[in-house]
Image: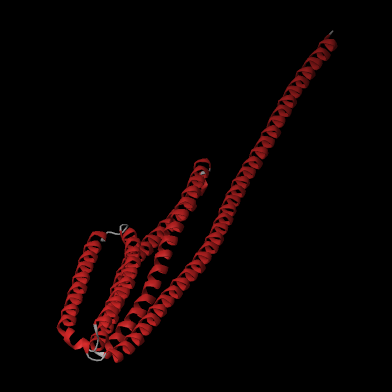
Amino acid sequence: MHPNSFEQSTFTARYLSVSTFTARYMSVSTFTARYLSVSTFTARYLSASTFTALYLSVSIFTALSLSVSTFTARSLSVSTFTARSLSVSTFTALSLSVSTFTALSLSVSTFTARSLSVSTFTARSLSVSTFTALYLLVSTFTALYLSVSIFTALSLSVSTFTARSLSVSTFTARYLSVSIFTALSLSVSTFTARSLSVSTCTALYLSVSTFTALCLSLSTFTALYLSVSIFTALSLSVSTFTALSLSVSTFTARSLSVSTFTARSLSVSIFTDRYLSVSTFTGSYLSVSIFTALSLSVSTFTDRYLSVSIFTARYLSVSNTICSSSQHSGADI
């Protein structure tokens, strides 16, 4: 293997780990967006119901209800487009996480291959006791590899549970099973080849036991130091990711509280405006009704006064006629 391939794999693994964090952040954002869209839809449904009741009671606000419905439809279409874009981003993030796991497995395999090549070069001068120590070293490394595999299996179970909510979970699971089977087959083939090389070079193991013991002690110390360093780095990366996830969750919770307060303030303002508009319309209607009633009462009073005046005039004219008739009669007598 070329010396630069390990560095390239390490750089690729770090780049993919950054991409994985970005993808998980985008998945959190997707969940937040869906929650907000549901809350927005509920709030708009309630406001639409309230507005419908007011619309049935007062037909003047028909134009305003149509404009509000148009704005709501446009907002919902934008929210739908955003949710679909975030779902595509989530699928991309899961693919990147699978690639990250593959890159980590390859880096572990590369480290294992290099350690085995060093052990093979050292083992050419081993005795029977040296072969036993090498076997113990391989067993230790195998135990570490199994612990990494268990951790990887747990990560895969979490990833599989997450991937079941996507439309391509079956294809991903089959791809992972084929990759795991291929990796296990390669590891078994590598171990078999190394065992055959060890069996072939058994005759050379009995030459320089002192140099071999020193080399083995140095290799064991180096392997333990590297394993401790890798475990420490993984622990630090997990702690960093946990802290970032908590900070993102805190920021999301505060944003949701601010959004909820804003929505409630807007709903109160809308209800107040509609109540005031209804009150204004009612006041105008009452003032018109009072003015109409006063006008009718004045008209009724005027009609009655005129009828009394006409009756009085007719009564006086009749009285004058009777008086004049009686005066003419007295003059003739």
- Residue name at image x 71 percent, y 32 percent: 302
Above or below for 207 versus 146: below
Residue 196 in sight? yes
Above or below for 44 versus 174: above
Whether residue 223 sits left or right of residue 189 in the image: it is right
**Residue 275 x %, y %:** 60, 47
Q: How many marks?
A: 0
Q: Quadrant of the C terminus?
A: top right
**Residue 220 x %, y %:** 35, 82
Could you say which is closer to the camera, residue 185 or residue 259? 185
Q: Specify the quadrant of the image occupied by residue 305.
A: top right
**Residue 196 x %, y %:** 15, 79
- Residue name at image x 22 percent, y 71 percent: 183
- Residue name at image x 37 percent, y 72 percent: 20
Whether residue 65 sits left or right of residue 175 in the image: it is right
Residue 89 in sight? no
Q: Specify the quadrant of the image occupied by residue 163.
A: bottom left
**Residue 76 x %, y %:** 40, 58
The color scheme shown is secondary structure
- Residue name at image x 30 percent, y 92 percent: 211
Q: Specify the quadrant of the image occupied by residue 118.
A: bottom left
Could you say which is closer to the camera, residue 160 or residue 86? 160
Could you say which is closer to the camera, residue 144 or residue 41? 144
Above or below for 181 versus 39: below
Q: Quadrant of the N terminus?
A: bottom left
Could you say which is closer to the camera, residue 110 or residue 224? 224
